Image (cartoon, rainbow, N blue to C red):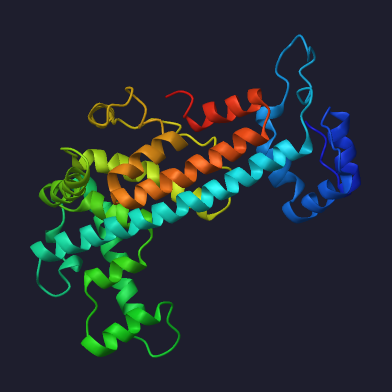
Amino acid sequence: MKPMKVFASHDEQITILQNRGLLVPDKAAARRILSRENYYALIDGYKEPFLERDERLNPYGREQYQAGTEFGHIYALYRFDRELRMLMLNELLKFEKNIKSKVAYRFSEKFKDMDSFLEPANYSGETDRHHERDRIISTLYNLIKSHKKRDRVKYPAIREFFDKHRNVPLWVLVNFLSLGQITNFYSVIDDELRERIAQDFAEEFSEEYEPLHLKASELDALLRIAFPYRNKSAHEEVLYRYRLTHPEELIDVDAMLRLPGGSLGKGTVYSMVSLLRLVLAKEEYEVFSAELERLMAELKAALPGRAYGVVMRDTGFREN
């Protein structure tokens, strides 16, 4: 059993890092950074690209930094990942709004009756989807019910709409569902609707780029990749080296976008960046790409070449 970690002051933390070979030329600045950012979040989250793995230089496999590594290098990667999360979250929120809009529009177009989304018969008839279907219906029902009361409400906009119109349609409710919930909603509607929504994305892409076909199963995979990126970006988790434990099947989309087979399904940052091209307006994607290139250029200038190469491999960009 490993010994329990004990409290260490900021000065003691710096000494620990120096004993492991990390250069700290400005201790006062390092102390301020550790005070603001937290040792665990900064060092444990971002030290990996800078550790010495060469057995000739580190024969005992201890936690040792590569020669010449400075505290500022780790902090530069930390800042890069923070800006990457903010950049990615902004675009993922656009995609989230897009999928919600399309799902609500197509479902309401097909099932025009009031509260049609509460009727089980309007969803897929496949029995293996019924459990999730019932969960979604319950979520929507409770969302409406909880906002009919006169006391505290979570979303005043729902309450105001109900007071004015005496019902709350799907195109209002979807705005208050999480990405996970709208992903599940999309998974349990009937296959005709699922394919129509996937094709809506394909048609928009085709108008701005080149002909593309997107299947519902491929949009499912895209959503399963986007979901953890949305959560990690919103909750300040390490993002740059995230990838799926179990890759998705997107070989046909790889081919349509002229990417190496398996590029998109791995769920790396590269995968997510490439997939966002399918679901964002071209102008928005070009702005996003330019900002990402700026972040990567700044990181390249701030890190030793070896460490930058490791980071780019972890993001999936070097692999592709």
Q: Is 220 rendered above or below residue 304?
A: below
Residue positioned 86% across, 44% down in the render: 6
- Left or right of 13 on screen, residue 108: left
Q: Where is residue 252 in the image (x, y as percent from the top left)?
A: 23, 28
Q: How many marks?
A: 0
Residue 19 makes an appearance in the image: yes
Q: Nearer the viewer, residue 308 or 36?
A: 308
Residue positioned 53% across, 26% down in the render: 313
Q: Nearer the viewer, residue 159 or 77?
A: 77
Residue 147 makes an appearance in the image: no
Residue positioned 76% across, 29% down in the render: 69
Image quarter hosting the N terminus? top right
Q: Where is residue 128 in the image (x, y as percent from the top left)?
A: 22, 45
Q: Position of residue 304 (x, y in %)?
A: 68, 27
Q: Is 32 rendered above or below residue 23?
A: below
Image quarter hosting the C terminus? top left
Q: Quadrant of residue 239?
A: top right
Q: Is 204 rendered above or below residue 173?
A: above
